[in-house]
Amino acid sequence: MTLGKLSAGAIVLAACLSLQGCIIVADGNGDYDYSSSDYRKQEEQNRQWIAALDDNATTTHVREKMGTPNFADRVTVDGVRYDVFYYRTHRVEADGDTTKDECTPVVFQDGVLMGSGEIALQQVPQVY
């Protein structure tokens, strides 16, 4: 065997031995496979945070505390802006997807908390 072949073999062996470690697997969209317990923890935390929101909480405060909502809607009616943030709080179907029916709406009028839940959502004027 020549010195070049031995050197190349040593490099390959060293590379193989150094490549051991932890692998994080993501799908093609960059989404990670979270366990159902991760979702349950997040749902519980979201329920607690929503229940503890102050009456004068702002959209900025809620985003800072709770993060980006799973869904968000905005509509302006007669010069009044309504924002609705939807945060996942329960599971309807264990399919790995979050849908609006698995979320609690948090409703704001001109950037200030109006309320949460379906009753608050019903107070937003419907635009047709």
Image (cartoon, helix red, strand yellow):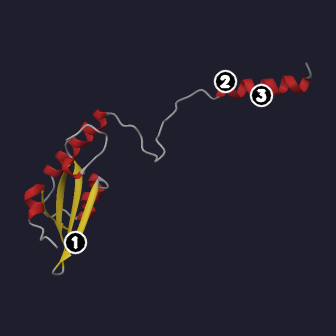
Single out the residue that lies furthest toward the top. Answer: 1
- Whichever of labels 1 and 2 marks the residue nearer the N terminus, that label is 2
Q: Nearer the viewer, mark 3 or mark 1?
A: 1
CA–CA distance in space, label 2 to label 3: 10 Å
Near mark 1 (Cα within 10 A), the count class, few <14, some 14-19 or many ≥20, is some
CA–CA distance in space, label 3 to label 1: 62 Å
> In the picture, which quadrant includes the N terminus?
top right
**Helix or strand or loop: what does disc 1 sit on?**
strand
Near mark 2 (Cα within 10 A), the count class, few <14, some 14-19 or many ≥20, is few
Residue 27: % across, % down: 46, 41
Total numbered labels placed on residues in the image: 3
Residue 75 tag number: 1
Identify which amino acid the numbered label 1 is placed on: Val
Q: Residue at x 72, y 25 (%)?
A: 14
From the image, tell me which residue sits under label 3. Answer: 11
Residue 30: % across, % down: 46, 46
Residue 65: % across, % down: 27, 54
